[in-house]
Amino acid sequence: MRTRIAASVITLLLALPSGAAAHEFALVPQPWQVYHTGQEVPFGLVATHAFLKSEELEDPASVSATYEGKDITLQADSVFLQHEGKVKLGKSGAALLRAHRKGEIWSNTPKGWLKGGRDTHKNAITSNKYEKFAKTLLPVDGKTEGFDKVAGDRLEIVPVDNPLAARPGDTVRFKVLLDGKPFAPESVTATYDGFSDAANTWAYLTEPGGDGLASIRLSTSGLWMVRVEHTDRTKTAEYDAHVMRATLVFPVR
């Protein structure tokens, strides 16, 4: 596996499309030192280029969140540009919170990026469908069983080693699933809250080998996000490609 590590003074800038399509989608919980059974934990669904700082309010009709198979009521916050919710944590173990930003079609046109596909924008340079999946893991009552549970998202990051038991300096392996099957993406990126305010800047990048495993060194404590992208270039009448992104958020003590 070929790996590049960004030290505290080095950043990696990834070129991404402009507009709402380029934002990362993450479920960001309120940080607590301890999470326990019965605790209500607020969270925000953020659309961001710089981790944890939401820059755009997603279409309410396109976002949803679940915990233990139940839908979570969301409320749009136009001030902080995020959808907010809260969960009451259940039994001990690794709590898995999930969110989905439904696929939206955006087109790059002579007037810039506009929502809608080729049926709407006849002069589109390119049209893509963007779909985003987000997961968050929290240790409840100090327990972490179930950290490797598969949620079933089309594109998904699943820990192989336990990130909830990791300490700064530990290396944790993650696998990527596409339609439930192991998948080796071109790259997997990661960052943590406070690393950089610069857009699309990551603390870590790794290029998985044939086994598809991404090894990431968790260099500091705090809230981490691992991210992956896959593009299905099967064309339709409306769009040229289906771009899927997935994030996994978890605390490192």
Image (cartoon, rainbow, N blue to C red):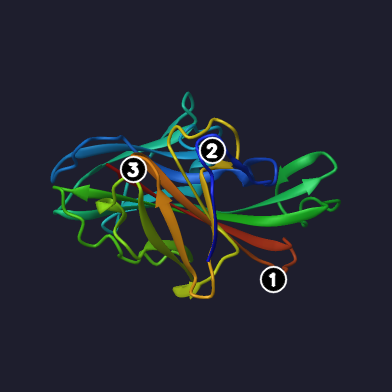
Name which quarter of the figure residue 52 lies in.
top left
Which of these two is toward me, 74 or 198?
Answer: 198
Q: Which of marks 2 and 3 is nearer the N terminus?
A: 2
Q: Position of residue 143 (x, y in %)?
A: 16, 53
Which of these two is toward me, 120 or 91?
Answer: 91
Task: Give the label on residue 73, or none.
Answer: 3
- For label 1, the crowd category at 10 Å Cα-Cα, with few meaning under 14, some 14 to 19 and many 20 or more, is few
Name which quarter of the figure residue 114 lies in.
top right
> Nearer the observer, disc 2 or disc 1?
2
C-alpha distance separating marks 2 and 1 = 27 Å
The local secondary structure at tag 2 comes to: strand
Residue at position x 51%, y 43% from top? 203
C-alpha distance separating marks 3 and 1 = 34 Å
- For badge 1, the amino acid type reads Thr
Task: Give the label on residue 134, or none.
Answer: none
Q: Which of marks 2 and 1 is nearer the N terminus?
A: 2
Q: Which of marks 3 and 1 is nearer the N terminus?
A: 3
> Nearer the observer, disc 3 or disc 1?
1
Q: Where is residue 147 in the image (x, y as percent from the top left)?
A: 27, 60
The local secondary structure at tag 3 comes to: loop
**Residue beneath label 1, please?**
234
Which of these two is toward me, 155 or 69?
Answer: 155
Task: Give the label on residue 48, or none.
Answer: 2
- For badge 3, the amino acid type reads Thr
Q: Position of residue 146 (x, y in %)?
A: 24, 62
Q: Where is residue 42 in the image (x, y as percent from the top left)?
A: 29, 36
Q: Is residue 90 left or right of residue 5?
A: left
- For label 3, the crowd category at 10 Å Cα-Cα, with few meaning under 14, some 14 to 19 and many 20 or more, is few
The local secondary structure at tag 1 comes to: loop
Above/below status of 81 relative to 126: above
- For badge 2, the amino acid type reads Thr
Residue at position x 52%, y 66% from top? 1
